[in-house]
């Protein structure tokens, strides 16, 4: 019996060793990360915020729209040291209450989307004012509080550039994961990427990176995407006239987003704005992260022919009131949709995809060519091409794109997948 018991114990220990070898050990803080500041007085219910600098050669200063619409604001400006246009190698790491005491052992990193921040996205959907949350009335709490109150150890990253290069931001997602592992002594972290945040989270686990970048470290257990353009999107080009009006200052626009056209006539004046271009133009490249999300859907859903200059806006050329290079030129300038799908999400990263099903975002022209959340087609948000292990997909029929970070049904679904 002793011999048999010893054999059983040896087998158990061997299996434990195999399983332990399959996961990365808990990590020390990487030497290339510099903690620059810690802030303990933080709005919207966070416990504290830290600012880090990734000193890796390769990070560079990205360009910002010269009229200031992409600058840091709110308390983030303080956290970035009062610098309105921070260096892209800097990022903020937010820690929620219970970050080091929650019952759930695998921590969660929340990654926000375009023209957003960790506060509005996850902790106070109404921070930017009326309709900023996608609804007539905005709640004052979001997914951070929902998960934290249920024992999840929650963190969030905040990027320096609100429309920045997803490859650089993917490196910082890896940085944040490494920091969380070092703080908590855990081998893996779960990622939740909302909208554009899907791009950097997926790029990280897929090792889609700049030449100078680090590959995936095997330290993610689950990846959850919320309204992520897994199959890409073409909204700005398909609804170009309406989108241009929201951006072009001469037409009254002020949205921090790229325009599909280079020239536009506003109130009788034909004006150029290369700084709003999807592609590098006139010495400007202010929206690299946006062209990386582009893919064509004209073959599936057509183009919105009610829009002025619809054909030249989508396919390129001079229209009656606008001109531009068209969507294919922007895709050729650096879309990451095909590279991400080709690289694939590793089989060990169980992936979940959630889509919204209500195109009813207040204040914008909603995507109406096919089933969508108002911005991203359901078919794109639920596109599993290149994902080796699909843990689940879900459609929240009552939520639009901006509600996915706080809608009760969406939050419950995320918590269920994390559990």
Image (spheres, grey):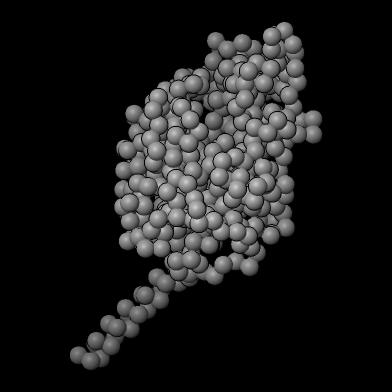
In the rendered view, tell whether residue 246 sits above or below residue 349: above
Q: Residue furthest bottom?
A: 2
Q: Can residue 23 be seen in this snapshot? A: no
Q: Residue furthest front?
A: 41
> Where is residue 345 drawn, in percent x and y?
50, 50
Q: Nearer the viewer, residue 15 or 56?
A: 56
In the rendered view, tell whether residue 274 sits above or below residue 20: above
Q: Quadrant of residue 354?
A: top left
Left or right relative to 61: residue 36: left
What is the count of numbered marks? Answer: 0
> Where is residue 295 drawn, in percent x and y?
57, 31
Tell me the quadrant of the picture where the N terminus can be found.
bottom left
Identify the residue at horizontal 61%, vertical 45% (top origin).
77
Left or right relative to 17: residue 261: right
Q: Residue furthest right?
A: 282
Q: Nearer the viewer, residue 341 or 222?
A: 222
Q: Nearer the viewer, residue 124 or 234?
A: 124
> Where is residue 312 drawn, in percent x and y?
67, 16
Identify the residue at horizontal 33%, vertical 83% (top origin).
10
Q: Can residue 264 be seen in this snapshot? A: yes
Q: Residue furthest left?
A: 1
Q: Quadrant of residue 18?
A: bottom left
Identify the residue at horizontal 62%, vertical 21% (top origin).
253
Identify the residue at horizontal 44%, vertical 34% (top origin).
126
Left or right relative to 261: residue 139: left
Left or right relative to 269: residue 379: left
In the rendered view, tell whether residue 268 sits above or below residue 117: above
> Where is residue 106 drawn, in percent x and y?
39, 60
In the rendered view, tell whether residue 99 sits above or below residue 22: above
């Amino acid at each position: 019996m002793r011999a048999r018991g010893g054999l059983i114990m040896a087998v158990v220990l061997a299996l434990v060793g195999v399983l332990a070898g399959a996961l990365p050990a808990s990590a020390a803080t990487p030497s290339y990360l510099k903690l620059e500041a810690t802030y303990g007085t933080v709005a919207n219910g966070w416990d504290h915020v830290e600012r880090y600098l990734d000193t890796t050669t390769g990070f560079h200063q990205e360009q910002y729209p010269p009229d200031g619409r992409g600058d840091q604001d709110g308390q983030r400006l303080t956290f970035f040291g009062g610098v309105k246009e921070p260096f892209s190698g800097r990022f903020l790491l937010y820690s929620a209450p219970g970050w080091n005491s929650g019952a759930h052992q695998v921590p969660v990193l929340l990654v926000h989307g375009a023209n957003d921040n960790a506060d509005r996205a996850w902790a106070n959907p109404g921070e930017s004012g009326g309709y900023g949350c996608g609804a007539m009335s905005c709640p004052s709490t979001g997914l951070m509080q929902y998960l934290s109150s249920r024992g999840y150890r929650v963190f969030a990253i905040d990027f320096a550039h609100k429309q920045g290069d997803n490859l650089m931001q993917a490196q910082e997602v890896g940085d944040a994961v490494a920091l969380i592992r070092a703080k908590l002594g855990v081998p893996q972290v779960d990622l939740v990427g909302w909208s554009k945040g899907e791009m950097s989270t997926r790029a990280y686990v897929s090792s889609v990176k700049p030449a100078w970048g680090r590959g995936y470290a095997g330290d993610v257990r689950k990846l959850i995407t919320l309204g992520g353009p897994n199959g890409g999107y073409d909204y700005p080009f398909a609804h170009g006239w309406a989108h241009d009006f929201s951006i072009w200052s001469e037409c009254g626009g002020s949205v921090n987003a790229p325009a599909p056209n280079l020239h536009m006539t506003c109130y009788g004046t034909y004006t150029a704005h290369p700084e709003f271009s999807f592609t590098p133009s006139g010495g400007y490249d202010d929206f690299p992260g946006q062209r990386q999300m582009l893919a064509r859907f004209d073959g599936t859903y057509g183009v919105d022919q009610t829009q002025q200059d619809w054909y030249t806006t989508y396919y390129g050329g001079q229209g009656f009131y606008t001109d531009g290079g068209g969507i294919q030129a922007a895709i050729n300038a650096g879309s990451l949709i095909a590279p991400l799908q080709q690289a694939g999400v590793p089989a060990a990263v169980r992936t979940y995809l959630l889509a919204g099903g209500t195109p009813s975002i207040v204040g914008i022209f909603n995507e109406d060519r096919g089933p969508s959340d108002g911005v991203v087609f359901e078919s794109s948000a639920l596109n599993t091409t290149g994902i080796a292990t699909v843990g689940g997909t879900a459609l929240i029929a009552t939520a639009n794109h901006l509600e996915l970070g706080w809608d009760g049904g969406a939050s419950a679904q995320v918590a269920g997948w994390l559990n």
